[in-house]
Image: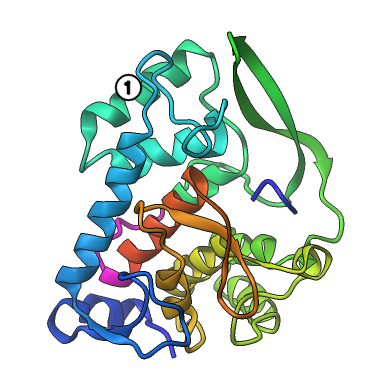
Amino acid sequence: MRQLNMLTRRQAMKLGALGFAAAGQLGMAADEPSKLVTAESLKLVLQKARRFLVDLMDQDLGLLPEYRGAKVYWIFHDNYLAAKVLNESHPETARQIRASMKREGVEHSGKIELLFGELKNPLPFRQFQLKDVRRVGDKVIRTEVVLSDIVVGWESYADFLLMASLAEKDQKSAWQTWEQALKMWDGKGFVDEATKQLKRYSTYKLALALLAAYWVPKAEAPDGLLERLLSLQDPSGGWITDYDASGKKIGLANVETTCLSILALEAVRGTLEPLR
């Protein structure tokens, strides 16, 4: 997010009894034959993802690096999201992250918190700045801070549209932004301005779409989206940043994408707490 037939909520609640066909928890490509994935096997996928996050913890800083081996530690969005998704499964790790955020004096950003109803006025979207908090030897603690200027042209980006559908309190407006985002789906991913420029798809937009499908009334994400997201989990347990049209993974498993994927799959399972 630092670059610019599916399950309804009701169907997700039935997942535990029915199971569903999906590919990916075994690392297969999205276009390979799918295997039956039950609620129990999806639970194991999520356990592995959370273990990926916990194993990244830097005990000296009390924070997670952007990816394994990275020297940059993002408070927002990475560690904020990690504290959220680990709060129940690994409460001590989540507590340690929150304590470190407080120590650094960075407990708010102004954008990603909208997923949890923690922003009074999440819209309109505003420009953001990436800034250094402090350096510790060769490590850098960084964060994202929302500015006052309004983002222009955000409707050309799938992530903004999906987040708007999550932030909109008016159901009609939420549905309209959801439909705008769906127009960018090409059967493999979301083709927005960023995708056209970078010539690759972003994994986290799949996760945002699942969250929006969970939240927006009557919304159903397109066929193949869930399978694609599952296929992009790395053997380490984390989710890879990007992928190409063939489904080939590009980049490394990182904290932000992994956290958003966890939230999305919890929504599919019907075990995600209400977003707000």
Residue name at image x 83 percent, y 65 percent:
197
Q: What residue is rendered at 49% in x and 64% in y? A: 207
Count every numbered label the image shows and give the total.
1
Q: Residue at x 46, y 75 (%)?
A: 213
Q: Residue 55: give x, y in percent of width and height.
A: 31, 35
In the displayed structure, would residue 261 be above or below residue 248? above
Q: Residue 154 in the image: x percent, y percent?
A: 79, 60
Boundaries of the magenta span: 268-276
* Residue 169 visible in image: no
Residue 270 among those drawn in magenta: yes
* Residue 54 belongs to magenta span: no
Residue 67 visible (yes or no): yes
Q: Position of residue 52 (x, y in %)?
A: 33, 44
**Few, some or many residues within 10 Å of mark 1 (<14, 14–19, 20+):** some
Position of 10 with respect to 107 (left or right) is: left
Q: Please tell me whether mark 1 sits on a helix, a strand or a loop.
A: helix
In which quarter of the view is residue 169 placed? bottom right
Q: Is residue 60 above or below residue 172?
A: above
Estimate the x, y position of residue 214 in percent, counting from the top left: 41, 71
92 lies above or below 99? below
